[in-house]
Image: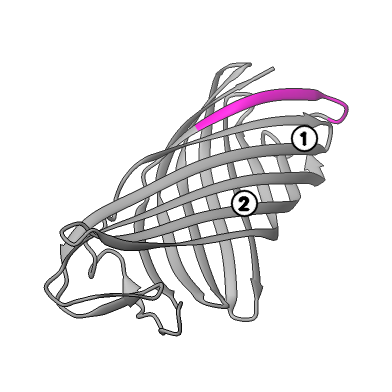
Amino acid sequence: MPVGAFEIGARGLYWLPTFSADIKVDDSGLVGDRLDLTSMLGVEDDKPFPSVEVFVGHGRHLLTLAYTAMDYSGSAILTQKIVFNGQTFAVGSRVDTSLDLKMFDAQYQYTVLDLENALAGVSFNLIGQIKYIDTEAKINEPIFKKGTEATLRSPLPMVGVGTHIGLLRDLLEARAKITGIAYSGNYLYEVLADLSLTPFPFLDIHAGYKALRLKIDESDVFLDTEFAGPFIGLTVKF
C-alpha cells in the first residue's frame, strides 16, 4: 500500500485443513485420560471451513479483524475405558464426540520497509495479534443418556513478521506471514503463504496454504491440536 493511501475491504477464505487433536480434562478428583480424538473417538479429520475478515489500512498501518468457526464430530465404540472431565465411559460403550472451536482475531500490521521499486514491490512487516480461543469439547453416551462437556476460553497475544513480494506489478503477488507465542510449555503459532491475482483494482483472488498449531496445558485442561491445509479466498477492497 503506498504511503498515505487509505484502504478498506473484506476477505473471505475457504480453508480445507487436515485435523488432529489430543485432549485431557481432569475433574471431580478424577485424572482424565489423554484422548486422541480422531483415532480413539472417530472424529473426522478433514472438513472445510469458511473464515471472514474485515480490514482497514492507511499508509504503513493495517488493522484486520477475523472470525473462524470450526466444528468436528464423530462416533466410536470404545476399545478401552476412558475418563473425561470427571465422567467414566466403559469399554464397549458407543460414544459421540464433538469439538467446537471459535477463533476471534485482532491483528495490527506495520510496514517497516517498503521497496516499491524492487521487482514489482517488496515490503516487510511487523505484526501484533490477539487471538481469542473459545473451545467446547463434548463426549456423550446416547444409549444411557449420559455425557459431559468441557470448555476452554483464552485470549492469546502473538507477535510475528510478514512479507509481500510483487511478481507482476498490480497483477500478481506473493505474501507470507508467521505469528506465534510460547510460554511455560504452551504455544500457539500460525503460518500462511499465498499467491494473489488482481484481475481488477478492487478484487483479489487468493490460493495458498495455512497451518495452525495450538498446545495448552493449564490447570485441569490439556489440548494439543493442529490444522493444516490449502485455502482459496476472495478479497474486495476500496
Q: 176 or 30: nearer the eye?
A: 30
Give me the residue at 42% from left, 56% from top.
227
Q: Which of the marked residues, 1 or 2, is nearer the chain's N terminus?
A: 1
Q: 115 or 42: nearer the eye?
A: 42
Residue 142 visible at all: yes
Q: Where the C terminus falls, by quadrant? A: top right
Q: Secondary structure at mark 2?
A: strand
Q: Secondary structure at mark 1?
A: loop
Locate residue 111, reporting x and y percent.
79, 44
Q: Are marks 1 and 2 in contact (CB under 8 Å)?
A: no
Amino acid of disc 2: Lys
Circle 2 is placed at which residue position?
177
Locate residue 200, reporting x and y percent.
57, 14
Q: Where the N terminus falls, by quadrant? A: top right
Give me the residue at 71% from left, 52% from top.
129
Read off the magenta span: 3-12
Give me the residue at 27% from left, 64% from top.
38
Q: Is residue 206 left or right of residue 106?
A: left
Within the magenta stretch, is there residue 78?
A: no
Q: Quadrant of residue 54?
A: top right
Circle 1 is placed at which residue position?
116
